Image (cartoon, helix red, strand yellow):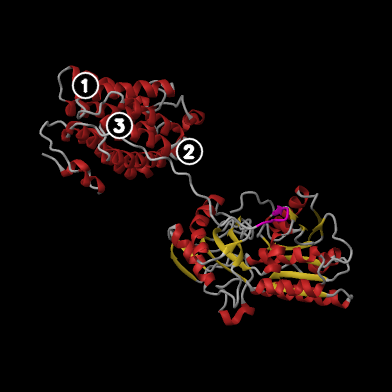
Amino acid sequence: MTRICGNASEFAHSALHGYSLVYRDIVRMVRGGVVRAKAGRAGKVAVVVGGGSGHYPAFNGYVGTGFADAAVAGDIFASPSTQAIYSVARRAERGGGVILGFGNYAGDVLNFGIAAERLRREGIDTRLLATTDDVASAEVGDMARRRGIAGDMTVFRIVGAAAEEGLDLDAVEEVGRRANSQTRTFGVAFEGCTLPGEADLLFHVPRNRMALGLGVHGEPGIDEQDIPPPAQLAHVLFDRILAELPDGAPRRVAIVLNGLGSTKHEELFVLWEALAPLLAQAGLTVIAPLVGEYVTSLDMAGCSLTMTWLDEELERYWRAPVETAALRHAGIMGEPDTTGSVMEEAPPVVHAPAGTPAGRRGGLCVAETMTRLAQALAGAEGELGRIDAVAGDGDHGQGMARGSAAARQAARQAAQARAGAATVLAAAADAWADRAGGTSGALWGEGLRAFSTALDDVSVPDARQLVHGARCAMERVMQLGRAQVGDKTLMDALVPFVETLERECDHGCALSGAWQVAADAAQKAADATRDLLPRMGRARTHGTRSLGHPDAGALSLALCLRVVGEGLPLIEPASVSMLPMEHMSGEKPVLDEFRS
């Protein structure tokens, strides 16, 4: 439901009034809509657009220089009345005639048509421009029945720029009809939208599914399928539009990748990354693309792709200066950069060979350990995120999974280069910190790097080195994080682990047995953090919210210690033979290939 609503029946009016107060330098509220605060020049063709509310920034956000002279706003998803359209157009008219632009919906066609008749009877030459860009709403041979959706934005933008340049009414109308005939849109919805004051969505899409061919008035789609990865979703949108390439269409296009209300910009940018190569492969040159929310449907989750094929004149208007609440830029000059942005790659890391068979075996052991950790943390990602969300930001599981996956890859590459244990672990540490990010990533990266200083590149790590490495890691993490036992952090599990490991080994216990006892102590301590209040990190601001819930960082550490302990018996026998390096290319744990 809408959380900020007030009187639901007055929602559209209140939103329009608030908008006009914010952008009073651009628009002025009148009965039924908004007009430019500074009217266009005398004799100019007036471009008046409109439809139901609930689509911001369409249509009010497009009033301003280089775009519309006025916008008419109906109630949510409802056509404005004939009287409102007539009244707003009368105020916007400057002597050059009026273009009434709207989406091709029955209510809009009726009310804008009647308003046009009244204006004409008063001597105001008025033309109707109904957008028909939605390819899902009717067959190719029945274009007049198609709906107008996000193509409203490109068509009306081009029309507005043509009127601003000074074209007469006939020429502006012709530009608009040409732009509309060369515009196509196709969209998908992941979930429906909610009318203000209502408690449920207008329609539901099953979990992990998407509706194809949505409308922007809360209509369900025409088909349904599983939500695909971004690369496949890009094909779903692009292929459907490209199948309707207009006859003789230019190779230059205006593109709007549009969010419908709840799809975030970052998601759209991910989708654009997948779309860009499809556009290039099709030989299309993209002119001033727009990615964001341009024609929405309240809080609908979904997106649409609009393409307008541009001839030389249409391209000039698409590039023209514009100043509205939702779109502002100077004239766009020059040719687009078709080389694309190239992600700068880090220089390859050259790892020195270990130099001894034992050293190579040590590097392989570390790489195997990183593989085991990455597998375990990938499996625990959801649960760790859920626990972290109680008093944190819920990203701990993702960070640990990302970091360990990167560490696994870096360790494998170093081991394939025949590096020893110290070098392989240092490479894994840097990759973990770089990919995981945040406080946890930095602490894990530095902790693992400190651990690597206790190893060497000429032997398989022994008990003395591993115990010393655990101590080095603990001291480095404590130094950086400044946390102590009792602060409800990973230190609550790390300190008892190190102290128990040292004590058990001092008493003559074998490494694998000592490690298991220490890992059990870490798990017990991690579970006990449920009774603590956080004193460090973000969770400290949530106080008692975390009481009764264990710390995600302590739990993930305890999990990792247990996983490492399970692999220790494999590296203790001195009779382990050397693994051929080609075995490192698969995902199967390395040490499984050469157990004695």
Q: Can residue 320 be seen here? A: yes
Other residues around mark 1 within 10 Å, as few (<14) / some (14–19) / many (≥20)? few
Q: Earlier in the sequence, mark 2 or mark 1?
A: 2
**Residue 94 in the image, given as x and y percentages of width and height:** 87, 65
Q: From the viewer's perspective, is the residue at label 3 or at label 1 nearer? A: 3
Does the CB distance between marks 3 and 1 fall below 8 Å? Answer: no
Point out the stretch of residues depicted in magenta: 326-334
Residue 422: image quadrant is top left
Of badges 2 and 1, nearer the viewer stands 1
> As drawn, is 259 to the left or to the right of 115?
left
- Choose the circle earlier in sequence order: 3 or 2: 2
| SS under mark 2 | loop
What's the amino acid at mark 3? Thr
Q: Does 224 appear above or below 422?
A: below
* Residue labelled with disc 2: 393
* CA separation in Å, label 3 and label 1: 18 Å
- Of label 3 and label 1, which has the lower sequence position? 3
Along the line of sight, which residue is nearer the eye, 402 or 576? 576
Position of 180 with respect to 590 (left or right) is right
Report the residue marked by disc 1: 464
Q: Secondary structure at mark 3?
A: helix
- Confirm whether the magenta stretch covers residue 331: yes
Q: Rate crowding at label 3 as few (under 14), some (14 to 19) or many (20 or more) other CA atoms within 10 Å.
A: many
- Seen in the image, is 144 located left or right of residue 20? left
Marks 2 and 1, how far apart at CA:
38 Å
Residue 29 x, y percent position in the rendering? 81, 56
